[in-house]
Image (spheres, rainbow, N blue to C red):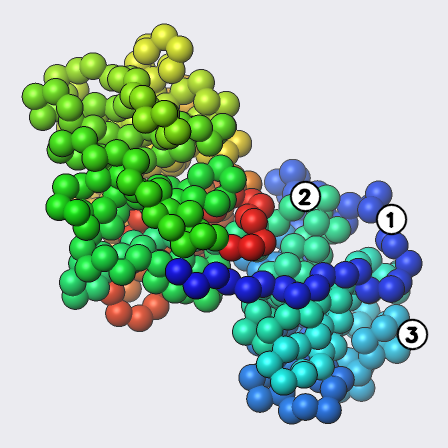
Amino acid sequence: MKKMILLLALVTVCMPVPCRAKVYIDISSPSSRRFPILVPTFKNTGSEPDREGLASKTPRVIADDLEFSGFFQIVDETALGPAALEGLTSDRIKWDTLAVVGAEAVITGGFSLHGGSVTFELRAFDAVQGKFIVGKKYEGRIEDYRLIAHRFANEVFRNLTGVDGVFETRLVYVRSFLDGKELCLSDYDGGNARQITTYGSLCLNPAWSPDGRRIAFTSYKDGNPNLYVMDIARGTTRLVSKKKGVNITPNWSPDGQKIALTLNLSSGNSEIYVLHEQSGSLERMTNDTATDVSPSWSPDGRWIVFVSDRTGGPQIYTLEVATGRVRRLTYEGSYNTSPAWSPRGDKIAYTGLTGGQYHIFITTPDGQFHQRITGREGNNEDPAWSPDGRFLAFCSTRGGQKEIYLMRADGSGQKKITFGKGQKSEPAWSPLRIHQSQ
């Protein structure tokens, strides 16, 4: 598999280092207003023409990132005259004009093209005080402009909120083709999508390792539904479980050393096991005559949430790893499945059948609180948490075929991020920090 060659250089623009003591946006406050920020068209400061449209495409990615976070309001640049947006540095910006449109921060960008490469100089300013906040210089291939935009959006988010954003993370998901289902990899927002398996078979249940280097998945490429692990950077795939019957629904432990999965080793009954990846040894976690599937670890590694039909239809249960103690979480509805434990540990998302349609629900680990967070449109399934626990990816049929959507953890801000032919399903969100050689 071809490696992604990322940025050639990443250096701070030569300006005074800002003090990070000030937090502009309190993301823990439920009443926090959206912070108005202006992200105008970038300037081509070089001699080569901008044939790729980077002047408009790059700031659009940054604006979309910040707006999706739910903490920013993007100010419309058309309300300003062209002269107000000519400056890239603090001494050239017309601060009084920005105040008229209510912008409290502004991002400026200049770039120059050199054959197939591009150099960006990006800055963010406090538009109220006219002060520099953060600036970066990036050099890379022209096709890396989205990565550069995501990276600077993270810089802005971090400097204004005090915490990391998710804009450099990625999604892996299942896409259907005429000859089967394959895995696809994309930016978190659906951009730069590419197919990463070409087996002409069924690939299912992708799951990221905590270090972001590997993806575990099930494939029928050798006949049996076996479990494989793909090294993303190296482009290699290794068989890790080929037990007779199913080897499905993998989920990595927080320490990255074990994989919880579903096997049916005895009498064809599906149970939850834990596979030690390096040694290949197995621990059986459930022992019931019912079907137990779809494990998901708690972030502290003490619990596993899973699906079982031991009381009739499929319901959500938790299992204490040390003791084997099982507790039922869901009682409402006759069909609840696909649980996913939030990285924050405080919530579990799952798919529930209600009113003849599938929807995404949230519950707490004690089962005392339940909330439906998708509306009435289509079937909504396969929830997957962002690594900061603030967002969810899921698939929905609201537009006809299955596509991947994103939303905030409260159900707001739902947006479609995949397009084109083929059903898309089973999204999995990468860890917050991924290795840059991938």
- Could you tell me residue 255's position as x and y percent? 49, 28
Q: Is the residue marked by circle 2 packed among few (<14), some (14-19), or many (20+) residues within 10 Å? A: few
Hey, which quadrant is residue 136 in on the image? bottom right
Q: Is the residue marked by circle 3 packed among few (<14), some (14-19), or many (20+) residues within 10 Å? A: few
Hey, which quadrant is residue 420 in on the image? bottom left
Where is mark 2, residue-wise? 163
User: Do the residues bearing badges 3 and 2 touch, measured as CB atoms within 8 Å?
Assistant: no
Q: Is residue 62 at least partly visible in the picture?
A: no
Q: Secondary structure at mark 2?
A: loop
The kind of residue on which mark 2 rests is Val
Residue 172, above or below 324: below
The kind of residue on which mark 3 rests is Asp
Residue 40, above or below 422: below
User: Do the residues bearing badges 1 and 3 touch, measured as CB atoms within 8 Å?
Assistant: no
- Could you tell me residue 169's position as x and y percent? 52, 52
Q: How many marks?
A: 3
Label 1 vs 3, first from the N-terminus: 1
Q: Is residue 152 at least partly visible in the picture?
A: yes
What residue appears at the point 19 percent right and 59 percent down from the top-left corner?
A: 200
Q: Is the residue marked by circle 1 packed among few (<14), some (14-19), or many (20+) residues within 10 Å? A: few
Q: Residue furthest top?
A: 323
Q: Secondary structure at mark 1?
A: loop
- Could you tell me residue 369's position as x and y percent? 41, 26
Where is mark 3, residue-wise? 91
Assign the N terminus to one quadrant of the image: bottom left
The kind of residue on which mark 1 rests is Cys
Label 1 vs 2, first from the N-terminus: 1
What residue appears at the point 63 percent right and 52 percent down from the top-left corner?
A: 71
Q: Secondary structure at mark 3?
A: loop
Label 3 vs 2, first from the N-terminus: 3
